[in-house]
Amino acid sequence: MVAQQQSRMSTGVVAVAMAGLMVCVGGCSVGRAGAEDARESITSVEVLHRAAATLERAGSAKTRTSMEMATGGTRVTIRGQGVYDFKKQLGQLKVLLPQDPAGAVEHRPITELLAPGALFMKNRGAGVPADKWVRVDTATLSDGNLVTGGATDPFAAAELLRGARTATYMGRTEVAGTPVRHYRGTADLDIAARSASRGNRKALAAAAKGFATNEVPFDAYLDDQGRVRKLRNRFSFINGRQKGTVAVASTTLLYDFGVPAHVRLPEPEDIFAGKIAEP
């Protein structure tokens, strides 16, 4: 797995939004400002709960991803780029691993195909023939493929927002020249899994069991049509090999909505059936 490769390669690397109630000194009930804050908090959560469905209606988009892993004072970044079809929940990414710490090894890009319940990887290395794909059932991964592939499935990332429990509207800003609304909050993996589409339900349920905590802090940037333009999720999981907690920040950028996104999954005979050698 990409995360396992990166863990070895880099020596083990891998609000609650306070709705302040304004209480009058004389025993009055909630003040006007507090009520407005509470309404804004509810509205922000509702907007985020609808974000994944809004992407489905948008159809498709180009995407850029980055995943930063930090543990023991070491930090690495894995980057990806490709397209995603939100209606079919299919995507294709080219994922680039960073150089080894010594800078001596340059890694070939890994081609990844994202599908409901499955991750396909080509140029996986570690004994896999160059013309073969490796298929992984994402429901069997302890992180639900939010981390393992080196890039978070863009639709799975958006579906995490279905589990938003708290959210604060931070104001307007821009992402790549597009005006957006910035929301900051925390999502619950259990809630997200129960609310997710059939294709992501089992994978997110696996992540809810496998991560160090069910809480996923996020920063979401939505355009005026409610489409996610940028989403940054922060995960925390236990590195069994190093017996420590690994902090992961996964960022997804979406742009060029409506672009053709033709993703063809491998034929059964093109999938590697042998044992994957340890990297």
Image: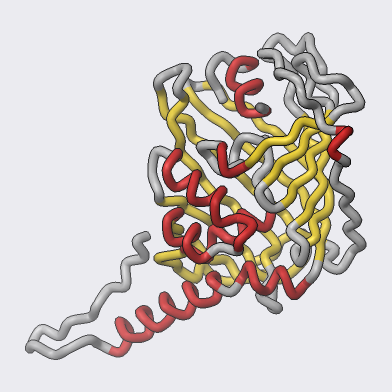
Vertical order, 91 against 66 (above or below): below
Quadrant of residue 99 in the image? top right
The image quadrant of residue 185 is: bottom left
User: The N terminus lies in which quarter of the figure?
Assistant: top right
Seen at 85% across and 63% down, the residue is 256
**Depth check, front residue: 261 or 232:** 261
List x then y, in percent, for residue 119. Answer: 71, 41
Residue 164 vertical placement versus 248 (above, below): below
Q: Is residue 20 above or below residue 262?
A: below
Q: Position of residue 21 (x, y in %)?
A: 24, 78
Residue 186: % across, % down: 44, 58
- For the C terminus, the image quarter is top right
Q: Quarter-wise, where is residue 201 in the image?
A: bottom right
Which residue, as the protein is rendered here, is positioned at the far left? 26
How far across and down, in percent of the image, does residue 277 sit?
Answer: 70, 14
Residue shown at the point (45%, 39%) measured from the top left:
210
* Residue depicted at 61% across the width and 70% down the height: 51
Q: How many marks?
A: 0
Q: How is the image coloured?
A: secondary structure
| Residue at 57% over, 31% down | 69
